[in-house]
Image: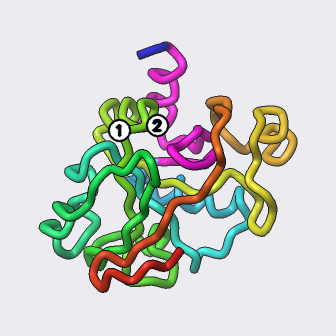
């Protein structure tokens, strides 16, 4: 684990909002235990609070407190070939900022080394949403992140070259594929 990863975890643990490369696209992230960080992330993106966000985790154990039926998490597999986000009925205590206008929570398990390390160091899932201003293209360079977001982010972990393909979305309760 390098210095940058340890520093990113420290920033997250103190309520920060950062940009990281995820298993799909460059994202903006914070920890779900900080309501103020989630609100800040929504404000930075100029995003409707009714859209909801995704929880990324390296292990389903980090997701248990956010879902109504944790046994359904056993159906989730980590698919590094085709990352998949699952919708599950949310626990009634899950923040409305995370859920948006929905009663489901979006979760994805990944073996991405950075996300795995951040989850382990923060002992938490990560709130995630695409690194862009709502309605615009996802940002794919550190320079563009700085231009778009100025000093609103507490840290930027530079993007990696990937295919920038969004994940598949499946409602785990109904089996319906959303995207």
Element carrying mark 1: helix
Q: Which residues are magenta?
A: 3-30
Residue for point 67% across, 34% down = 161
Q: Mark 1 — residue?
A: 119
| Position of residue 86 in the picture relative to residue 149 (left or right) | left
Mark 1 → mark 2, Cα distance in angstroms: 14 Å
Residue 41 place in picture, x, y as percent = 61, 56
Residue for point 41% across, 16% down = 1
Residue for point 69% across, 69% down = 47
Depicted 51 relative to depicted 137: above or below: below
Q: How many marks?
A: 2
Residue 177 place in picture, x, y as percent = 44, 78
- The 10 Å Cα crowd at callout 2, few under 14, some 14 to 19, many 20 or more, is some
Element carrying mark 2: loop
Depicted 53 relative to depicted 103: above or below: above
Q: Mark 2 — residue?
A: 14
The answer, for residue 156, to whether it is visible in the render is no
Question: Which sits in the foreground, 84 or 143?
Answer: 84
């Amino acid at each position: 684990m390098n210095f940058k990863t340890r520093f990113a975890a420290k920033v997250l643990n103190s309520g920060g909002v950062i940009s990281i490369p995820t298993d799909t696209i460059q994202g903006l992230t914070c920890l779900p235990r900080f309501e103020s960080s989630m609100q800040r992330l929504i404000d930075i993106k100029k995003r409707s609070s009714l859209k909801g966000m995704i929880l990324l985790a390296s292990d389903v154990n980090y997701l248990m407190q956010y879902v109504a039926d944790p046994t359904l998490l056993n159906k989730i597999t980590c698919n590094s070939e085709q990352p998949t986000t699952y919708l599950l009925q949310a626990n009634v205590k899950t923040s409305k900022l995370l859920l948006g206008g929905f009663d489901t929570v979006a979760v994805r398990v990944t073996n991405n080394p950075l996300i795995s390390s951040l989850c382990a160091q923060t002992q938490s899932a990560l709130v995630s949403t695409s690194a862009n201003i709502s309605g615009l293209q996802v940002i794919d360079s550190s320079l563009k992140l700085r231009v778009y977001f100025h000093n609103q982010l507490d840290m930027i972990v530079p993007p990696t070259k990937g295919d920038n393909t969004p994940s598949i979305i499946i409602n785990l309760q109904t089996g319906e594929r959303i995207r």
